[in-house]
Image: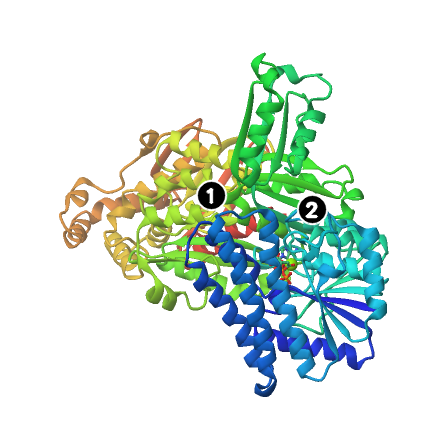
C-alpha cells in the first residue's frame, strides 16, 4: 500500500493534472494498492483567504474574485472531461461555489471572520480540487471515489492548525478504508472536530494528511509529489545551484522544514517516523527522477552538511536587564507566557552572561509578544530589573542542517567565515543541542547573498561563482573579457569556478545583470540593453545587488572612479585594478584603502599598477609578510623609456629613437608625458609605500631629463624640432657614458627612505646594463637578498600582459573563497 500526495503545484493546470493522471495510471497498471491525497489548486488557498478578508471588510469585489477561482476549476473540467460527461461535474462544482458564496455573504453581512470560519472557507480549496480530479479519473474509467478527510481526520478546536487526535483518527481511517474498494481520492489539509466543525492542519498541511493516512494504513511508502526534484540542498528558487539530496534522515528533514524548506510540512514527518515508513519527495514534472528518500538513517553524504534553509521574515525579541542575572525562572515564565498566547518561538539564543534573552518569532506575532511580555514582567520592569524589551524586524533566519556536523569540526567556523568575508552581519545565532543545525539571524536584505555564499562553500563540488563588475572596456578591459571568455570552460570544468560578468560599463553605456552578461556577446548586450553610463548609479546598483563574492574591476585610468573604492571595500566588495590613481594619491588615502579591505576581509589588488603583469607587488608583499627588510629598490618602470634608452647608442640620433618609439605606439601622444618621468615617479611611490615607507608624491625627486627648450615647445611637432636642436646634448650624454664603458638608463631608486627618478649610467656589472627592448626590470636588495639582489625582468606594458595580471589578481580572490 502506498499513499501519494499531489501538491497545489501539481494540480494547478490542465497539463499538470495530465501528468498526475499518468502517474496514477502507472501505479494502477503495476497493480499497486494506492490512496491519493490532493491539495487545492496552486494559489487557491491564498485566494480564498484574501476573498474571506475582503468579504469581512465589506468589499463587494470579492464576488468577482470568487468568479475567477470558479472559472479556474471550470477550465480544468472543460479541458479534461469529455463534453458529454461534463455537466454533472459542473453542477457539483457550482454547488460548492454556491455554498461558499452563501458563507461569504454571511461574513460580509456580519463583518466578522473568525479562524473557525476561515477554516471552513479554506476547506473549499481541497474539496473542489479533489472533487474535480475524482470526476476526471472516473471519466477515464478508473474506479475512483471522493473522500472528504473531515470524515476521517479528527482534531481539537485549534482552528487554523488543528491538533490531531490520533487514537480516534487512526480508528476512523482504518474503518473507512476497510469498507472502501475504489481508489480513494482524499482531500488534503482539512479535518473536523468531534462536533463535525471543519478545521485545517496548518498551511502546507496536505503533506500531513498523506502522512497521517500512510501511518494509519501501515503504508510501505508515502510519496509527496511536488514541482521540484525532491528535497534539495537549498530552496532552488533562491539558490540556483541547489541540487537534490538523495537520502535524508527524518530528523534532518524536520530541521530543514522547520527552518523554512516548505517542500515538506514539518508535522508530516512525525507519523511516518513513528511507523518507520519511507517518505519520498518526487517531482510530478520529472517522473523518472529518483527524488529524495526520507528515512530513519540517511546514507552517508559527501558534504559536511545536508542542506540549508531559511525563513525570510522573522522578528527578534530581546529582553535585557541586569536584574535577570542569576534569577531562576525568568526564561521559564517567558516561554510559558508566550506559549499560553499561542506565540511560537522559532529560535532561542541566550547570551552566556544571562544578561539578556533573545529569541525569534513570526513578525505577525510581534505586537502581541510585546504586550504579553510587558504584562508578564510588569513588576520587573517597574523595579528596573529588566531594562528593555525590544523587537527588531526585517530579519531572516538561515539554518544549516546535517547529521554530518556531529563528526566534522569547523562547520561553524566555515559558516561564520563565509558570512564575514561577504560582509554579512550576524545578529543572533543558535546551535541546536542535537548538533543537527546551526542557525543565524541576519538582515533580510542579505538573505539571498548569504544563502548563495554559504551554499557555495559547503557544497564544494559544485561551481563557485565570482561576480565581476568591470568598468572600462577599452584595450585592457576588452582584452580581459576575451581572456575570460577563452578560459571560462577550463575554469568551470577544472576549477569549478564560474566567472560571472554581473556588470559592465564603458564611457557611454552600462549594463548590470546578476544572472550574467556573458563574456562572448557582451558588446551586443551592452549596446542593446545598456543604459547611459552613470558611475554613481553603477556603484549603487552593485551594492544593492549584494551578490556574494563580488569583485569590482576598474580597467580605466580615470581619476574620479577611485573615490568609490573605499565605499566598495566597505560594502565587502573586492577591488582589482591596474589604475594607479588611488595608490599614488595621498598616503592617507592609500592606507585607508588597505585598512578598509582588511577590516572587511576583502581584497584590494593592484599588481598591474607597476610593471603590468610582472609579479612585483606580490613579491614585495610576500617578502614583507615573511619579515624581510628592504634596503634598496632600483627599477626601470617605463616600457617607453626602457625602449628609448635601450635603442639609443653611438651613431643614432635621440630624436629618431623617440620618433620610432612614437611610431611603434610605445609613447603617449605627447612623448613628453613619458619623458617627464611622472609616471615612473608614481610607480616608485607605490613601491615605496608597499615596503613601508610612507612617502607623498612630492617626496619623490624627479630629475628632469629634457632640456628646457624641449619642455617649453608648444606642440608635439615643435618638441621634435627642439630635440633636433638639442641633439648635441643627448649625443654628449651618450658618448660620455660610452667612454666609461657604461650605458644610459632611466632608473627609479628607493634607498634610505628616499625616492629618486633620474637618468643614470650603469656599468657592465649592473643587472640593468643588458636590458633590451621595452622590458621593465626591478632589483630588490633586502636583508635576505643582500649579496645578489632579487631581480624581476620582463615586458612591463601591453594590453595582453596587463589584462593577464588583472586576471591573475581576480583568480587569487577565487582561491581565497575556500
Ligand atoms: P506543493 O504545492 O507541492 O506542496 P510547495 O510549494 O508547498 O509545493 O513546496 C515546494 C516548494 O518548496 C518548491 O517549489 C521550492 O521552491 C520550495 N522549497 C524550499 N526549500 C526547498 C528545498 N530545500 N528543497 C526543495 N524545495 C524547496
Ligand atoms: N492548500 C493548503 C495550503 O495552501 C495545503 C497544502 O497545499 O498543503 O496551505
Ligand atoms: Mg506544500
Q: Which residue sits at x=65%, y=77%?
A: 135
Q: Residues within 10 Å of mark 1 (few under 14, many from 20)?
A: many
Which of the image's four quarters has the N terminus? bottom right
**Whether residue 441 can be seen here:** yes
Left-right relation of 99 to 584 = right
The percent coordinates of residue 87 (x first, y second) are: 57, 81
Nearer the camera: disc 2 or disc 1: 2
Question: Residue at 48% of width from left, 32% of height from top?
Answer: 595
Question: What is the CA distance from the residue labelled 2 to the residue labelled 1?
Answer: 83 Å
**Residue at numbered disc 2:** 157
Question: In this orientation, which residue lies closer to the viewer: 454 or 745?
Answer: 454
- Say whether residue 628 is left or right of residue 144: left
Q: How is the image coloured?
A: rainbow
SS of the residue at dot 2?
Answer: loop
For numbered disc 1, what is the local secondary structure?
strand
Determine the residue positioned at 82% across, 67% down. 177
Number of the label disc, if any, that sits on residue 778: 1
Residue 140 is left or right of residue 182, and the answer is left
Considering depth in this image, is 768 or 381 the residue closer to the camera? 381
Amino acid at each position: 500500500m502506498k499513499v501519494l500526495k499531489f501538491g497545489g503545484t501539481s494540480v494547478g493546470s490542465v497539463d499538470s493534472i495530465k501528468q498526475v493522471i499518468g502517474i496514477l495510471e502507472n501505479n494502477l497498471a503495476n497493480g499497486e494498492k494506492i490512496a491519493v491525497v490532493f491539495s487545492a489548486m496552486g494559489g487557491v488557498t491564498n485566494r480564498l483567504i484574501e476573498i474571506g478578508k475582503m468579504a469581512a471588510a465589506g468589499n463587494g469585489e470579492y464576488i468577482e474574485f470568487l468568479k475567477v477561482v470558479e472559472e479556474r476549476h471550470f477550465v480544468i473540467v472543460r479541458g479534461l472531461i469529455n463534453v458529454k460527461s461534463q455537466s454533472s461535474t459542473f453542477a457539483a462544482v457550482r454547488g460548492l461555489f454556491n455554498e461558499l458564496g452563501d458563507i461569504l455573504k454571511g461574513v460580509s453581512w456580519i463583518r466578522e471572520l473568525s479562524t473557525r470560519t476561515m477554516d471552513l472557507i479554506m476547506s473549499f480549496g481541497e474539496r473542489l480540487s479533489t472533487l474535480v480530479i475524482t470526476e476526471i479519473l472516473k471519466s477515464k474509467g478508473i474506479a475512483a471515489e471522493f473522500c472528504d478527510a473531515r470524515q476521517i481526520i479528527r482534531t481539537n478546536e485549534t482552528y487554523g492548525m488543528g491538533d490531531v487526535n490520533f487514537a480516534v483518527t487512526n480508528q476512523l481511517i482504518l474503518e473507512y478504508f476497510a469498507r472502501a474498494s475504489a481508489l480513494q481520492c482524499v482531500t488534503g489539509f482539512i479535518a473536523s472536530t468531534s462536533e463535525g466543525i471543519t478545521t485545517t492542519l496548518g498551511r502546507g498541511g496536505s503533506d500531513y494528511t498523506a502522512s497521517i493516512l500512510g501511518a494509519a494504513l501501515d503504508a510501505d511508502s508515502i510519496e509527496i509529489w511536488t514541482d521540484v526534484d525532491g528535497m534539495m540542498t537549498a530552496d532552488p528558487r533562491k539558490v540556483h545551484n541547489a541540487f537534490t539530496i538523495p537520502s535524508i534522515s527524518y530528523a534532518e528533514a524536520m530541521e530543514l522544514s522547520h527552518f523554512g524548506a516548505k517542500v515538506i510540512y514539518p508535522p508530516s514527518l512525525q507519523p511516518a517516523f513513528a511507523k518507520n515508513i519511507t517518505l519520498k519527495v518526487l517531482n510530478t514534472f520529472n517522473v523518472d527522477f529518483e527524488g529524495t528518500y526520507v528515512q530513519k538513517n540517511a546514507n552517508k553524504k559527501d558534504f559536511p552538511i545536508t542542506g540549508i534553509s531559511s525563513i525570510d521574515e522573522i522578528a527578534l525579541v530581546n529582553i535585557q536587564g541586569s536584574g535577570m542575572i542569576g534569577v531562576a525562572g525568568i526564561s521559564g515564565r517567558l516561554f510559558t507566557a508566550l506559549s499560553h498566547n499561542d506565540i511560537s518561538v522559532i529560535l532561542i539564543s541566550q547570551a552566556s552572561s544571562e544578561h539578556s534573552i533573545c529569541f525569534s518569532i513570526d513578525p505577525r506575532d510581534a505586537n502581541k509578544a510585546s504586550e504579553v511580555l510587558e504584562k508578564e514582567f510588569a513588576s520587573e520592569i517597574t523595579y528596573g530589573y529588566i531594562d528593555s524589551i525590544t523587537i527588531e524586524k526585517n530579519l531572516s533566519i538561515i539554518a544549516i542542517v546535517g547529521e554530518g556536523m556531529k563528526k566534522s569540526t569547523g562547520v561553524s567556523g566555515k559558516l561564520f567565515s563565509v558570512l564575514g568575508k561577504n560582509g554579512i552581519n550576524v545578529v543572533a545565532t543558535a546551535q541546536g543541542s542535537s548538533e543537527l543545525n546551526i542557525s543565524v539571524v541576519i538582515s533580510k536584505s542579505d538573505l539571498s547573498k548569504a544563502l548563495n555564499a554559504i551554499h557555495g562553500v559547503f557544497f564544494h563540488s559544485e561551481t563557485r561563482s565570482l561576480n565581476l563588475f568591470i568598468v572600462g572596456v577599452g584595450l585592457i578591459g576588452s582584452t580581459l573579457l576575451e581572456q575570460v571568455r577563452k578560459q571560462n570552460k577550463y575554469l568551470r570544468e577544472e576549477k569549478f569556478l564560474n566567472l560571472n560578468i554581473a556588470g559592465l560599463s564603458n564611457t557611454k553605456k552600462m549594463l548590470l545583470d546578476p544572472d550574467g552578461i556573458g563574456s562572448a556577446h557582451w558588446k551586443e548586450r551592452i549596446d542593446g540593453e545598456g543604459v547611459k553610463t552613470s558611475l554613481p548609479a553603477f556603484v549603487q546598483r552593485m551594492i544593492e545587488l549584494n551578490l556574494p563574492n563580488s569583485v569590482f574591476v576598474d580597467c580605466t585610468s580615470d581619476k574620479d572612479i577611485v573615490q568609490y573604492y573605499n565605499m566598495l571595500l566597505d560594502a565587502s566588495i573586492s577591488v582589482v585594478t591596474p589604475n594607479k590613481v588611488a595608490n599614488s594619491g595621498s598616503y592617507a588615502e592609500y592606507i585607508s584603502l588597505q585598512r578598509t579591505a582588511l577590516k572587511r576581509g576583502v581584497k584590494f589588488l593592484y599588481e598591474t599598477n607597476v610593471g603590468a603583469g610582472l609579479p612585483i607587488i606580490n613579491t614585495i608583499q610576500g617578502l614583507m609578510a615573511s619579515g624581510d627588510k628592504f634596503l634598496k629598490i632600483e627599477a626601470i618602470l617605463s616600457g617607453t623609456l626602457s625602449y628609448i634608452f635601450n635603442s639609443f647608442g653611438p651613431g643614432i640620433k635621440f630624436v629618431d629613437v623617440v620618433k620610432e618609439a612614437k611610431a611603434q605606439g610605445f609613447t603617449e601622444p605627447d612623448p613628453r608625458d613619458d619623458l617627464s618621468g611622472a609616471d615612473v615617479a608614481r610607480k616608485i611611490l607605490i613601491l615605496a609605500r608597499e615596503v613601508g615607507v610612507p612617502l607623498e608624491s612630492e617626496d619623490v625627486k624627479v630629475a628632469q631629463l629634457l632640456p628646457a627648450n624641449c619642455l617649453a615647445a608648444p606642440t608635439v611637432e615643435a618638441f621634435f624640432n627642439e630635440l633636433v636642436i638639442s641633439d648635441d646634448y643627448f649625443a654628449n650624454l651618450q658618448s660620455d657614458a660610452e667612454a666609461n664603458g657604461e650605458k644610459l638608463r632611466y632608473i627609479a631608486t628607493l634607498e634610505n627612505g628616499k625616492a629618486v627618478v633620474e637618468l643614470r649610467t650603469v656599468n657592465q656589472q649592473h643587472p640593468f646594463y643588458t636590458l633590451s627592448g621595452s622590458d621593465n626590470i626591478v632589483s630588490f636588495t633586502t636583508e635576505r637578498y643582500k649579496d645578489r639582489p632579487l631581480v624581476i625582468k620582463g615586458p612591463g606594458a601591453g594590453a595582453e600582459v596587463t589584462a593577464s595580471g588583472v586576471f591573475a589578481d581576480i583568480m587569487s580572490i577565487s582561491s581565497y573563497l575556500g
